[in-house]
């Protein structure tokens, strides 16, 4: 390369470098002017405190946003009490639940020992009922509305049912016997079997069917309730006996359970349905035995009196009719009893039973051998349900009886467990808070609507000043 060319190239490089520096300088000056024009205060970086992610602040934040159960529901009184806690009758406070009735089951999470309260946590029964009720949705299963956790207590909110079969049986048996109409009885049994068929098809055993756990709504719809003892049976990790040694209330307990079965099937629920059918017919329990109490939790006593009540009506079982009978742990106990002949037909006729198909279904439900006992799905196609009068959706249809409403105790309606004065003050505060929240929501809606109107008007005026208006479609129209 010649010296002249080198000089030209050097001049060109210097000019290019000067232009780049000039452009860079102009850009920096422009940025500086913009920063001066839009001067913003420097925001310090927000850093969470060291205990932000610990349980105490988290619980505090959750508690501050949680709506109390008494803000959602007005407690009208309590229905029943048991080892698990209490069941309350309530009315909805929110606009979407106003005038709707609910049953709120409160589980106890503590126990009292020598006047000292101990926190015992969530019971197995509560966990089972919550997990199953959240998944099981059927017209003949009690509907779980929501679960509320507040102050170490769990509240299960169900749709309210005004009656149960125990109430109805008591009404018909006191002060004098008034037999349940055939349509009411048949429709109730059919709906129980529909709900039970749904449970069994979804691999769920109820394990505590009895009249008190069969609810009936004002519309005459039967609902199977209280799934506290229910459990899945499709893939058990161990025998059912190892988990719960005693299941089903004694009068409705199947003979295989009384004989100490370690494994059992949905047939135990079908036996309980047979007992319920017989009780609806006669208005008294079919097998009303005396329960032998447990001395300790390790060994379950043999229920001799209860088995005797069954033998007196159904007769003594034999290996010909029940081939696996001698495989049960308590089989040898049968030798204590004298031989009884079958007596169910005589019992049925004594209690004014005349329908042969009803008796046949009762025999199939109270079959000794669980492998031969009729299933819930098969029973729905039984001849008794196919003949007139056929089952209806409203079990009270055509009935002349008017059943009294469920009794509630209004003197104890404090679901949170405080004094009566505190409860009254809290209820008034809850009602006021809910009313204020509704007014605030209405006010917010009004303000939001006014804000939108003002904003639209401002935009329209601005566009008109610029020679047109926006019709909301995104197109700008010129004024003519």
Image (tube, rainbow, N blue to C red):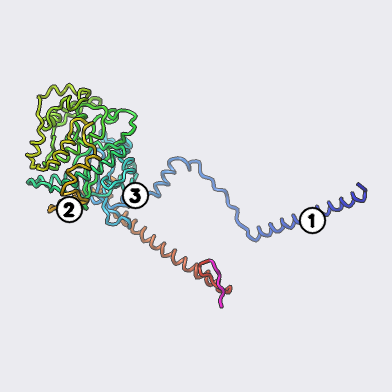
Is residue 191 or residue 333 the one in the foreground?
191
Which residues are the magenta region? 474-480
Q: Which mark's residue is nearer the viewer, 1 or 3? A: 1
Is residue 39 or residue 306 the one in the foreground?
306
Mark 1 neighbour class, 10 Å CA radius: few under 14, some 14 to 19, many 20 or more: few
Q: Which mark's residue is nearer the viewer, 2 or 1? A: 2
Q: Secondary structure at mark 2?
A: loop
Does residue 201 appear to the left or right of 407 in the view shown? Answer: right
Residue 110 appears in the figure: no
Does residue 280 appear to the left or right of 20 in the view shown? Answer: left
Residue 264, given in percent of the width and then of the height, sits at: 26, 30
Q: Earlier in the sequence, mark 2 or mark 3?
A: 3
| Marks 1 and 3, how far apart at CA | 71 Å
Residue 340, given in percent of the width and then of the height, sits at: 9, 28
Q: Earlier in the sequence, mark 2 or mark 1?
A: 1
Q: Is residue 260 magenta?
A: no
- Residue 456 image label: none
Q: Quadrant of the C terminus?
A: bottom right
Mark 3 neighbour class, 10 Å CA radius: few under 14, some 14 to 19, many 20 or more: some
- Residue 397 image label: 2
Is residue 100 or residue 41 the one in the foreground?
100
Identify residue for label 3.
Answer: 68
Identify residue for label 1.
Answer: 19
């Amino acid at each position: 390369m010649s010296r002249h060319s080198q000089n030209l190239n050097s001049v060109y490089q210097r000019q290019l470098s000067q232009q780049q520096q000039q452009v860079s300088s102009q850009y920096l000056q422009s940025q500086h002017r913009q920063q001066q024009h839009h001067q913003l205060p420097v925001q310090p970086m927000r850093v969470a405190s060291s205990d932000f992610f610990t349980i105490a602040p988290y619980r505090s934040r959750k508690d501050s946003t949680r709506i109390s159960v008494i803000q959602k529901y007005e407690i009208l009184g309590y229905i029943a009490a048991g080892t698990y806690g209490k069941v309350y009758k309530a009315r909805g406070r929110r606009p979407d639940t106003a005038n709707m009735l609910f049953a709120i089951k409160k589980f106890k999470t503590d126990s009292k020992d020598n006047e000292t309260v101990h926190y015992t946590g969530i019971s197995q029964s509560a966990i089972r009922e919550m997990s199953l009720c959240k998944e099981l949705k059927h017209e003949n299963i009690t509907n779980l509305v929501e679960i509320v956790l507040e102050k170490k207590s769990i509240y299960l909110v169900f749709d309210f049912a005004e009656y149960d079969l125990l109430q109805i049986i008591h009404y018909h048996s006191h002060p004098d016997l008034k037999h349940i109409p055939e349509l009411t009885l048949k429709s109730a049994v059919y709906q129980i079997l529909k709900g039970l068929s749904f449970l069994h098809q979804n691999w769920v055993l109820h394990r505590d069917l009895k009249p008190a756990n069969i609810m009936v709504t004002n519309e005459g719809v039967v609902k199977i309730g209280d799934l506290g003892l229910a459990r899945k049976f499709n893939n058990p990790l161990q025998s059912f006996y190892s988990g719960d040694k005693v299941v089903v209330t004694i009068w409705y307990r199947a003979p295989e359970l009384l004989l100490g079965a370690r494994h059992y099937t949905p047939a135990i629920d079908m036996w309980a349905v047979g007992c319920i059918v017989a009780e609806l017919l006669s208005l008294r329990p079919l097998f009303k035995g005396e329960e032998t109490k447990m001395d300790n939790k390790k060994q379950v006593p043999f229920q001799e009196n209860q088995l005797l009540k069954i033998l007196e009506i159904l007769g003594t079982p034999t290996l010909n009719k029940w081939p696996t009978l001698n495989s049960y742990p308590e089989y040898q106990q049968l030798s204590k009893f004298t031989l009884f002949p079958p007596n169910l037909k005589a019992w049925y006729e004594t209690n004014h039973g005349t329908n042969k198909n009803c008796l046949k279904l009762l025999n199939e439900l109270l079959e000794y051998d669980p492998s031969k006992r009729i299933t819930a799905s098969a029973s729905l196609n039984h001849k008794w349900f196919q003949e007139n009068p056929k089952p209806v959706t409203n079990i009270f249809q055509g009935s002349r009886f008017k059943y009294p409403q469920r009794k509630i105790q209004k003197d104890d309606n404090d679901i949170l467990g405080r004094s009566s004065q505190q409860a009254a003050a809290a209820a008034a505060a809850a009602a006021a808070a809910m009313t204020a929240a509704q007014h605030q929501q209405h006010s917010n809606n009004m303000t939001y609507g006014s804000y939108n109107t003002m904003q639209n008007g401002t935009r329209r005026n601005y566009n008109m000043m610029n020679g047109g208006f926006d019709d909301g479609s995104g197109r700008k129209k010129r004024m003519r």
